Image (tube, rainbow, N blue to C red):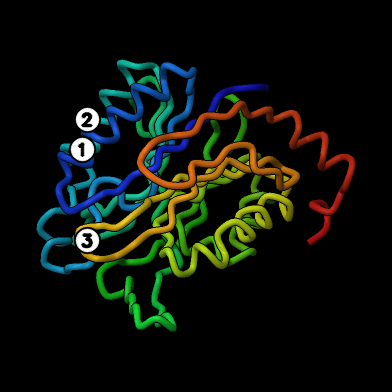
């Protein structure tokens, strides 16, 4: 079954309403090109490394303004929508959460990022995501009208077994909303995404943050849509914007039947 998927590329900041406006504007444009599923990157509505700002501005999962505006948008536009990742408050914790909303405006599933980005990069950049977020524990796949979507967020990309398990659970597509640093993105982004696609013969949807952010962090951009055999179908290299590509889920079945490597653990 064929459908059109869109990935938005953003330069989010610490002002949720500004970020929401950017998402709506780009989504409107993607809809004009026939998008039936719209995916946003990690840190969609709030991008901050400051713990106080994070605690103050993270949305309540059930009452958050931006989340509920996207729920309304999905229903009004009759489009499936993946909020790729945004900080949410839930049960006294903050999670980095993906939220999948159907075209009727219902939340179908959520995924909380499992692998925390705790790294010390050679250029002096230090990140300790686990100090601010509670990691998730559960792998999630969701049924779309066209196939099954396996959910992940950014640093999960470096853990191949995460995606192997999603494939074993029935995933035809993999979402990898991200805010890769420019430093690591230049070295690893493309090869990691194409590898996850080929290893599992899945489409990969990878919306990304891009450019220089107010907090001096620089993200890599290069939002990608990758075919099950590792071909880059579309790429937004730099700047805010979006990409749209046709997805044919039957190609997943075809390549898996030709090369049955996914049948072996």
Q: Residue at (42%, 24%) from the top-left corner?
A: 30
Q: Residue at (61%, 41%) from the top-left corner?
A: 173
The residue identified by callout 3 is 48
The residue identified by callout 1 is 66
Q: Are marks 2 and 1 in contact (CB under 8 Å)?
A: yes
- Locate residue 228: give its quadrant: top right
Discs 1/3, front: 3
Q: Position of residue 260 (x, y in %)?
A: 87, 48
Q: Secondary structure at mark 1?
A: helix
Instruction: Using the image as rendered, state which of residue 10 and residue 152 is in the foreground.
Output: 10
Residue count near mark 3 (Cα–Cα under 10 Å), binned few <14, some 14–19, many ≥20: some
Left or right: 39, with 159 as reference point:
left
- Locate residue 94: give its quadrant: bottom left
Q: Earlier in the sequence, mark 1 or mark 3?
A: 3
Q: Secondary structure at mark 3?
A: loop
Residue at the outermost front position: 238
Left or right: 32, with 130 as reference point:
right
Residue 141 visible in rendering: no
Q: CA distance from mark 2 to mark 1?
A: 5 Å
The residue identified by callout 2 is 69
Discs 3/2, front: 3
Q: Residue at (25%, 24%) from the top-left corner?
A: 72
Residue 131 visible in rendering: yes
For residue 28, the mark is none
Instruction: Using the image as rendered, state which of residue 21 and residue 93 is in the foreground.
Output: 21
In the rendered image, which quarter contains the N terminus? top right
């Amino acid at each position: 079954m064929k459908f059109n998927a869109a990935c938005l590329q953003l330069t989010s900041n610490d002002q949720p309403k500004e970020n929401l406006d950017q998402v709506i504007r780009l989504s409107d444009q993607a809809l004009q090109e026939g998008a039936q599923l719209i995916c946003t990157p990690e840190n969609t509505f709030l991008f901050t490394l400051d713990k106080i700002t994070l605690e103050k501005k993270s949305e309540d999962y059930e009452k958050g303004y931006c989340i509920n505006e996207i729920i309304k948008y999905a229903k009004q536009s009759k489009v499936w929508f993946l909020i790729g990742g945004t900080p949410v408050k839930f049960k006294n914790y903050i999670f980095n959460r993906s939220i999948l909303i159907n075209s009727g405006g219902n939340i179908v599933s959520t995924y909380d990022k499992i692998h925390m980005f705790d790294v010390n990069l050679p250029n002096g950049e230090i990140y300790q995501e686990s100090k601010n977020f509670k990691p998730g524990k559960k792998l999630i796949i969701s049924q779309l009208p066209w196939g099954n979507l396996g959910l992940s967020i950014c640093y999960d990309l470096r853990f191949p077994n995460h995606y192997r398990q999603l494939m074993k659970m029935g995933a035809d597509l993999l979402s990898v909303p991200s805010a890769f640093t420019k430093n690591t993105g230049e070295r690893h982004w493309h090869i990691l995404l194409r590898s996850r696609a080929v290893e599992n013969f899945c489409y990969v949807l990878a919306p990304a943050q891009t450019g220089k952010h107010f907090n001096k962090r620089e993200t890599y951009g290069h939002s990608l849509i990758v075919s099950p055999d590792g071909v880059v179908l579309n790429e937004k290299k730099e700047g805010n914007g979006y990409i749209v590509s046709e997805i044919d889920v039957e190609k997943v079945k075809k390549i898996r039947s030709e090369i049955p490597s996914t049948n072996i653990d």
